[in-house]
Amino acid sequence: MDKEIERMTSTLHQMEMDYWINHDLFSFQWWAILIMNAIFLILFFLLIDRQRILLITLAFMISYVINTIFDDIGEYFQLWSHPHQLVQFVASVATVEFIIVPSIMALMYQMFSRWKFFLIVDFIVSLFISFIVQPIFVYLDIYKLHNWTYFYSLLVLFVIGVLVKIIMDFIKTKQLNHL
């Protein structure tokens, strides 16, 4: 059984790579993914607080990891898919939102330190991404919903924001206690 799974996995990877090279690379969707993520990366670097660069970059990385975990789970259980990818062979940097969501979450953490304001902004941003940005991605065929809804995305994005804030506040508290 192990050999059969290895053979099938190898065949799948080869098919995915062939498709990516022949149909995806340099397509409109590929350029859209590249440009959107480049814009958000540039905005992140322009807006980051230079006095707290390590802390905000850590918030970015934590958001990236949490977002990647949620995305991998969703793809594995076929809740959604990303028909077009920036890089086929590295799933965590392949999807349309691999820089967008972490940039937004990190900047939210930077700008809204009080929980009340953070939760309000987190909800508004999650609402905007779920009901405006994601439908645009679906229309552009960059993102496909299978057994998923925009409302579920709202909940997940909101939770990701809350998790980032909890983890970062914990780290910040530990850091201040050791100074």
Image: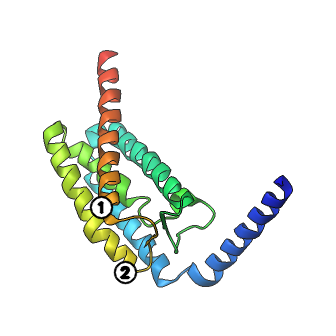
Horizontal side of residue 21 vs 166, given as left or right: right
Colouring scheme, one of rainbow, by chain, secondary structure, one colour: rainbow
Q: Is residue 30 above or below residue 40?
A: below
The x, y position of residue 57, in whole percent, is 37, 44
Mark closer to the observer (1, 2): 1
Q: Nearer the viewer, residue 137 or 77?
A: 77
Q: Which three-letter amino acid code belongs to the residue tagged 1?
A: Phe
Horizontal side of residue 24 vs 61, given as left or right: right
Q: Is residue 65 above or below residue 43?
A: above
Residue drawn at x 41%, y 64% as measured from the top left: 148
Q: Nearer the viewer, residue 157 or 151?
A: 151
Mark carried by residue 139: 2
Horizontal side of residue 37 vs 24, given as left or right: left
Residue wearing tag 1: 151
| Quadrant into which the N terminus falls | bottom right
Q: Is residue 155 above or below residue 88?
A: above
Q: Which three-letter amino acid code belongs to the residue tagged 2?
A: Tyr
| Quadrant into which the C terminus falls | top left
